[in-house]
Image (tube, rainbow, N blue to C red):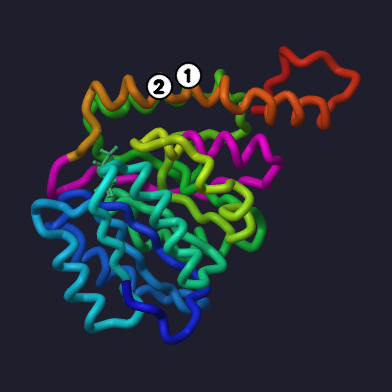
Amino acid sequence: MKRAAKRPCAVAMIPTYNEAENIAPLIRDILALDTPCDLHILVADDDSPDGTWRIVRRMAARDRRVHLLRRLKRRGRGAGGIDGFRAALDLGADYVVEMDGDFSHRPAHIPALLDAAGRADLVIGSRFVKGGRDADRSLWRRAVTWGVRRFIRRLFRVPVRDVSSGFRVFSRRLLEALDLEDLISVGPSVVLETLFKTHLMGFRTIEVPIVFVDRVRGRTKLDFVTLLETLAMALKFKKRYAPLEARRAAAASPSRPKSGRRRN
Ligand SMILES: Nc1nc2c(ncn2[C@@H]2O[C@H](COP(=O)(O)OP(=O)(O)O)[C@@H](O)[C@H]2O)c(=O)[nH]1
Ligand SMILES: [Mg+2]
């Protein structure tokens, strides 16, 4: 991975697997953004057979703001994202923008998300706040999002509307506190694990509207088995982070009973 000459204030961290058709135009669009500070890009690619990493390596050689993390073992959206967070911190980022490499997360939203990052440690690009939208997706995917959302909001009791959004900005402070080594997700459940832990540790989270669009090129890696695995992982987090949850509940209301409180 190439070192930045100047410390980036933010790094767009993009986990990828077989995004050869999307990655070059996506990187170009991000580099063209007008951001208040130096925005770099780090692609965490799992040695994609379609050569995504080769494209990124070429672009990285030409632009000091582009970085490649080519991973050779333990493939997975979660494992890749966790290594990507670590590499982005190593580059010196104050903020890390986590986003997909398929244009579902439109670069045009990044300035607004970064703008909000001064007000919270986690900024969530949200489809379900005023001005946000889940556009052009199949009925099946919308139904999945709806079900997952209901289940997770109930299970985790997080005051967040778009719990499964992977378009987010993390502050360095939060990523350091999350203790990346301690996260157990290998797959897409990492989005839920980081959200739950952030909430339990008492960090401030805000949602900023985004319009989510379906990918035009390439194929989704989310299949039915992965979806079930993700939900099973959510139950595992509930158990694993129970001590943190108990501590938070005790700190929030020492004299009040634990159940029955919904915040939104
Ligand atoms: N590094 C890495 N990235 C992955 C893996 N699986 C999916 N991704 C990336 O994660 C993002 C979201 O995946 P996608 O297949 O679009 O899932 P969907 O948006 O839920 O349909 C995309 O940028 C993918 O390329 C993986 O195994 N490793
Ligand atoms: Mg996608």
Give residue 151's mark: 1
Left or right: 212, with 122 as reference point: left
* Residue type, mark 1 in image: Phe
Secondary structure found at label 1: helix
Q: Is residue 205 magenta?
A: yes
- Residue 264 picture location, percent across and down: 64, 28
Q: Is residue 197 magenta?
A: yes
- Residue 158 picture location, percent across and down: 61, 30
Badge 1 residue CB within 8 Å of ligand 1: no
Near-viewer residue (167 or 201): 201
Quadrant location of ligand 2?
top left
Give residue 231's mark: 2
- The stretch of residues the image draws in magenta is 192-219
Q: Is residue 102 visible?
A: no
- Residue most extreme to the bottom: 5
What residue lies at 30% left-to-right and 62% top-to-bottom?
A: 69
User: Do labels 2 and 1 touch, CB within 8 Å?
Assistant: yes
Near-viewer residue (115 or 38): 38
* Residue type, mark 2 in image: Leu
What residue lies at 58% left-to-right and 61% top-to-bottom?
A: 172
Q: How many marks?
A: 2
Near-viewer residue (13 or 136): 13
- Residue most extreme to the left: 50
Up/down of 28 relative to 137, above or below: below
Label 1 crowding class (10 Å Cα cut-off): few <14, some 14-19, many 20+? some
What residue lies at 26% left-to-right and 48% top-to-bottom?
A: 73
- Residue 162 picture location, percent across and down: 48, 36
Q: Quadrant of residue 185?
A: top left
Secondary structure found at label 2: helix
Quadrant of the snapshot with the N terminus: bottom left
Up/down of 133 relative to 81, above or below: above
Left or right: 186, with 94 as reference point: left
